[in-house]
Image (tube, rainbow, N blue to C red):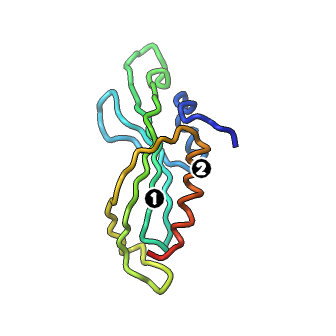
Amino acid sequence: MRRTSLCDFEDEPDRLVRHSFVRRDESTSDSVHLVWFERILDSDESQIRFIIRIEFELGLTDDPHDSSRANESYSFHGVVLEVINRRMRRYDSVTFEPDTERPQVVGQHRLTIRTLREVNQLVQLLRPSLHMPL
């Protein structure tokens, strides 16, 4: 896989959706706010949920002569790993009941990841831990 810098997504961060990320926007009317793309890793066999967020700062200008896309400026802000204890009841000896989930954030950690390849490597490292009993 190519070592695509996450800064390369500044021109069109929505391309991350093609890499299994979901776009989320900070709820604000400010002209500068956070936009992030997250991938959730969880399983009915684990009480743990990992959320990997690739964050961008979005600056909006109000130039009526430019298209709405030209009025948007993104800058890569960083990668965050969030760890959540899902606090679910057991369904059987292997799985938990997702309907009983009461999520609690255990921690958020800013990572030094700078490429999409490193993000995908992190996903591969975290995935096996979702199938180990807690």
Question: Horizontally, is 131 left or right of 85 in the view?
Answer: right
The kind of secondary structure element at disc 1 is: strand
Question: Horizontally, is 75 left or right of 116 in the view?
Answer: left
Say if 53 sits above or below 114 in the image: below
Residue at the image position 38 percent from the left and 36 percent from the top? 34
Residue of label 2? 120
Give how far apart the Cα atoms at labels 1 and 2 are: 13 Å
Residue at the image position 56 percent from the left and 55 percent from the top? 123
Nearest the eye: 101 or 106: 106
Residue at the image position 38 percent from the left and 68 percent from the top? 86
* Horizontal and vertical percent position of residue 66: 47, 16
Report crowding for label 1: few under 14, some 14 to 19, many 20 or more residues within 10 A (C-alpha): many
Dot label at residue 50: 1
Say if 57 sits above or below 125 in the image: above
Quadrant placement of the N terminus: top right
Question: Horizontally, is 131 left or right of 56 in the view?
Answer: right
Kind of residue sitting beneath label 2: Asn
Kind of residue sitting beneath label 1: Phe
The kind of secondary structure element at disc 2 is: helix
Q: Which residue lies furthest to the front in this view?
A: 112
Report crowding for label 2: few under 14, some 14 to 19, many 20 or more residues within 10 A (C-alpha): few
Residue at the image position 35 percent from the left and 55 percent from the top? 107
Nearest the eye: 128 or 101: 128
